Image (cartoon, rainbow, N blue to C red):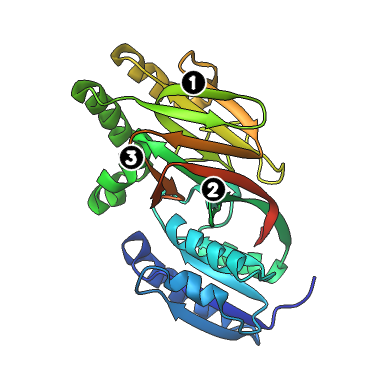
Amino acid sequence: MIPLKKIKIIANPSSGREQALHKINQLLAYMSRDPWDIQLLFTREKDDASRFAMQEDQEDVIVCIGGDGTLNEVANGIYHKERAVPLAILPTGTVNDFGSFLNLPQDVGGFYQLLKRNQVEAVDLGLANDRVFVNVAAGGFLTEIAYTVSEDQKAKLGRMAYYLEGAKELVGGIVRGDRTWELEVVNKQFHRTYQAQMFIIANSTSVGGFKNLAPTAEIQDGLFDVLILENLDFNEIVEILTQFMTGRHIHHDRMTYLQTDEITLSCKQDIIVDLDGERYQPLPMTFKVIHKGLQVLV
């Protein structure tokens, strides 16, 4: 273990209804005990976090304070500049899927001890065309939830807000009659078209607040776990949502579940791909695993 000397902090001050600001103050108080050179950078506009992460400032570690979207930007900055600097994650968002999967401390005292240990592991990244994602790429009803849940709902209900909105989105799609679209899937094993309602390409088990949405996923196996939900009818909504909680949904008749290191998706409809909770681009898109492409403090 090499002792830390310089630490760059990239923080989204509005994350978690400004919970981040409180945690930053606490963290600086802890860090003042050590002879570290600290660089603190606040994001104000889109892509600030990527730009800060790209800058070579001779730092020994980058600390990301924010939600999944901020984490995605920082990871893209590190990847596209081909930097080897490790990343420490202090989650302050509502869901924090990747941090939850790694069981990273959300309390500042625990995070400070993580920095002191400076224990690094390499984890997989996903590549969607030319942008990386840390935890998940998705399209369909589940991706709409993040944009329809209000900040007040997130603050009051947390993960439950996502579960409730997921049920509403499924029911609404069936009522509107726009519940499915043709999804063409190509990988090394097969070529098939689905009448799909949702697809998920997961790096970890935790997606959208559901801890077992991709129950066999691992972040160092060089594989995505891919879920495709097909043509769910009204009577199956409660059943599938209940199974999301336990991981049993992967055996449902309407669910395809597979593992692959590369997959290409295309669709006649205009389906926007969501990367780590942020809108990206519409299909078609090719997704590839970058095996152990990111160093993370654990």
Disc 3 and disc 2: Cα gap in Å?
A: 23 Å
Task: Name the residue tied to disc 3.
Answer: 270
Q: What number is the disc on residue 255? A: 1
- Residue 126 horizontal/vertical position (percent): 59, 49
Q: Secondary structure at mark 1?
A: strand
Image position of 99 (left or right of 166): right
N-terminal of the pair, mark 3 or mark 2, is: 2
Could you classify mark 2 by the number of other residues whose Cα lies within 10 Å: few (under 14), some (14-19), or many (20 or more)?
many
Disc 1 and disc 2: Cα gap in Å?
A: 20 Å
Amino acid found under the numbered disc labelled 1: Met
Image position of 149 (left or right of 193): left
For the C terminus, the quadrant is bottom right
Image position of 51 (left or right of 19): right
Q: Looking at the image, do the residues carrying marks 1 and 3 touch, with CB atoms under 8 Å apart?
A: no
- Of 28 and 96, nearer the camera is 96
Amino acid found under the numbered disc labelled 2: Asn
What residue is shown at x 45% (from left), y 41% (from top)? 284
Q: Secondary structure at mark 3?
A: loop
What residue is shown at x 51% (from left), y 45% (from top)? 136
Question: Which image quarter: residue 250?
Answer: top right
Q: Secondary structure at mark 2?
A: loop
For the N terminus, the quadrant is bottom right
Task: Name the residue tied to disc 2.
Answer: 135
What residue is shown at x 66% (from left), y 67% (from top)? 86
- Residue 59 horizontal/vertical position (percent): 64, 80
Q: Residue furthest front?
A: 268
Q: What number is the disc on residue 137? A: none
Camera-side mark, 3 or 2: 3
N-terminal of the pair, mark 1 or mark 3, is: 1
